[in-house]
Amino acid sequence: MLMHPPGAAALSPTTTTADDEGTPVSVKIRERLNAAKKRFNANDNIAEFIEPGELEQLLDEVTQKMEGVLSSMVIDTERDHNTDNTARRVAKMYVNEVFRGRYVRPPSITEFPNAEHLNELMIVGPITVRSACSHHFCPVIGRVWIGVMPNEHTNVIGLSKYARLAEWIMGRPQIQEEAVVQLADLIMDKTQPDGLAIVMEASHYCMAWRGVKDMDSKMINSVMRGVFLKDPNLRREFLALIPQRKS
């Protein structure tokens, strides 16, 4: 058991010591996650374990690592004006933009009571979504339709908030099947409806840009919860009301 001298306070896990100064910020964040026995897969949000100011430090660390990647690819970034500062641009793209959903807390959502006791099917979409596959970090670009069957206890949120929640979930390295489930879990938790239906259609550039290089393939999948899962007529109504998808 670790003992402290009389009168000395124990250091908290986030206290900075002299030994911490040379430790990469990614290591500090990882240690907190491990101590809390929290998973940190590519599509997990880890914002809870990032302290103020550390995201900027992480950006600097990723920049440095990207410089090493470019060097290992034998790209002369010192004399090639096209790749000068590319490492920083790529780091900012990953940390602050396309994978932002890993590093920031969920968007603030104002919820209102269902004062009018609405209980009719509501559909939101298509919402444009942008993500990246966790296998190759290639773009995944698509659209999402969300169907909600409210009840008198359902929390009502603004239409734009569905897009905000989708952006937060999709802003991580993902596979489409898991992304739709994560989005469904989040909306169910926020709104508590009788039922939820989500359909996502997306192009995967790991197929279009590399591999088989098929530009026309799309993946379509759905998640049904609550009454949408139990009532085939309601499920058919939702699918029929989605505007005809265009290629």
Image: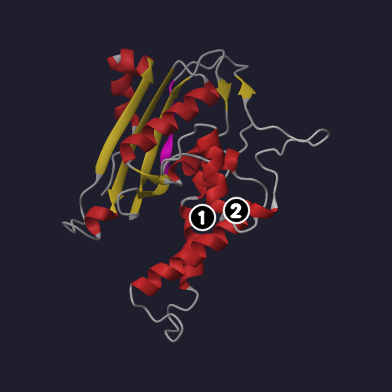
In the rendered image, residue 200, in percent from the top left (x then y), is placed at 33, 38
Q: Residue at x 49, y 28 (%)?
A: 187
Q: Which SS class for mark 1?
A: helix
Tell me the element at label 2. Answer: helix
Q: Is residue 67 above or below residue 80?
A: above
Residues packed near mark 1 inside 10 Å, few (<14), some (14 to 19) or many (20 plus): many
Tell which of 208 and 30 is nearer to you.
30
Residue 108, image x, y percentages: 62, 37
Name the residue carrying label 2.
55
Q: Label the magenta part by its dominant secondary structure.
A: strand
Quadrant placement of the N terminus:
top right
Decide: is 184 above or below 175. above
Q: Which range of residues does the magenta coloring cover?
A: 121-127
Q: Residue furthest right?
A: 7
- Can the viewer see residue 211? yes
Q: Residues within 10 Å of mark 2 (few under 14, many from 20)?
A: some
Q: Which residue is mark 1?
A: 95
Amino acid beneath label 1: Val
Q: Is the residue under label 1 in contact with that under label 2 (CB below 8 Å)? A: yes
237 drawn magenta: no
Amino acid bearing label 2: Leu
Q: Nearer the viewer, residue 27 or 230?
A: 27
Please indicate whether residue 23 sits to the left or right of residue 222 in the image.
right
Q: Which one is nearer the viewer's eye here, 200 or 65?
A: 65
The outermost residue toward the bottom is: 79
Inspect this view and state whether residue 243 appears.
Answer: no
Horizontal arrangement in the rendering, residue 116 relative to residue 172 (left or right): right
Looking at the picture, how far across and down is residue 51, in whole percent? Answer: 65, 46
Q: Is residue 225 above or below residue 77?
A: above
Which is in the foreground here, disc 2 or disc 1? 2
